[in-house]
Image (tube, rainbow, N blue to C red):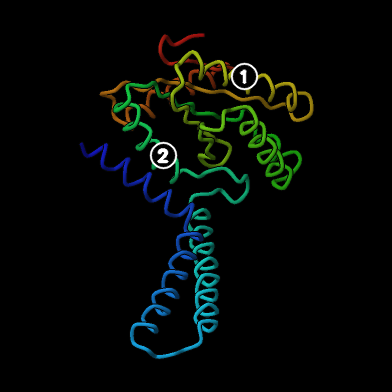
């Protein structure tokens, strides 16, 4: 029940931030209309155009305020370099998606990703070039996954992806497409590839246990490099 409540609260909060400009704008109009009807009821005889102007100003002020609130929320969950979600958002979404998967009896997978030989880019071309490569890699990830998948920059040259509703076979297939794209695009120029561990979440499995299993699959893949391993059977 606690998982369900946490998920529902998270969904409600995200909806609020998403529509905050419109919520505050409507609130501004409501305040203006309330003042207008109070004016009529109390027979203050103020000009109706004045109240219309007040309602408009309050609506605009609410829209701007809501926009700032939405931007602040987004920036707290976004990686500034790649534009991907950050680790903080990863934990929030994984908790919510686990609850949703348990409730709806749908699959849920997670991939942990590491860039092979990335340190060579920083050593040879400098950190600015490394940052550009990370941004390009992020674009490859985003353009390969589905809109419902959650791509995260875990930190440094590590990434993670949450696959809501995807089976282990489906998540593995997506990671293979990403691995192939990265190898084709970056291997000859920078000598990098990706290694990844993919794991499906069992209904009774804790989030931390899931991540530890995914990490073990990732490090097993890193031992060979340019490889994706599904943790269900340890090999693919």
Q: Which residue is farthest left?
A: 1
Residue denoted by label 2: 93
In the displayed structure, 82 sits above or below 22; it is: above
The quarter of the picture where residue 212 lies is top left
* Camera-side residue of 158 and 9: 9
Q: Earlier in the sequence, mark 1 or mark 2?
A: 2
Cβ atoms under marks 1 and 2 closer than 8 Å: no
Q: Of helix, strand and loop, which one carries label 2?
A: helix
The image shows residue 188 at horizontal and vertical percentages of 78, 24
Give the vertical position of 167 relative to 194 (above or below). Answer: above
Out of 3 and 194, give the one closest to the viewer. Answer: 3
Residues 78 and 63: in front is 63
Tell which of 52 and 234 is nearer to you. Answer: 52
- Whole-angstrom CA distance, mark 1 to mark 2, is 28 Å
Q: Which residue is mark 1?
A: 226
Residue 79 percent location from the top left of the image: 56, 48
Picture residue at 35% right of the left edge, 37% below the top: 95
Compared across the picture, whether 52 is left or right of 13 comes to right
Q: Quadrant of residue 224?
A: top right
Q: Residues within 10 Å of mark 1 (few under 14, many from 20)?
A: many
Q: Residue at x 45, y 75 (%)?
A: 32
Residue 191 lies left or right of residue 217; in this view the side is right
At a point 51% along the width and 32% down the height, the residue shown is 148
Drawn side of residue 5 relative to residue 166, left or right: left
């Amino acid at each position: 029940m606690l998982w369900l409540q946490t998920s529902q609260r998270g969904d409600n909060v995200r909806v609020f931030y998403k529509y905050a400009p419109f919520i505050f704008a409507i609130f501004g109009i409501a305040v203006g209309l309330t003042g207008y009807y109070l004016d009529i009821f109390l027979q203050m005889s103020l000009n109706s155009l004045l109240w219309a102007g007040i309602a408009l100003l309050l609506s605009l002020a609410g829209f701007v305020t809501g926009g700032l609130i939405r931007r602040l929320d987004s920036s707290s969950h976004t990686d500034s370099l790649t534009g991907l979600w950050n680790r903080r958002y990863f934990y929030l979404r994984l908790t919510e998606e686990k609850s949703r998967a348990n409730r709806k009896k749908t699959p849920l997978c997670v991939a942990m990703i590491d860039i092979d030989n990335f340190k060579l880019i920083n050593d040879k071309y400098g950190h600015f070039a490394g940052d550009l490569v990370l941004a390009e890699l992020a674009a490859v990830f985003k353009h390969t996954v589905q809109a419902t998948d959650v791509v995260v920059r875990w930190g440094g040259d590590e990434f993670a992806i949450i696959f809501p509703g995807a089976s282990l076979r489906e998540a593995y297939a997506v990671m293979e497409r990403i691995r192939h794209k990265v190898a084709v695009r970056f291997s000859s120029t920078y000598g990098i590839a990706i290694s990844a561990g993919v794991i499906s979440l069992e209904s009774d499995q804790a989030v931390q246990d899931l991540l530890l299993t995914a990490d073990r699959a990732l490090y097993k893949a890193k031992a060979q490099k340019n490889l994706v391993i599904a943790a269900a059977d340890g090999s693919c």
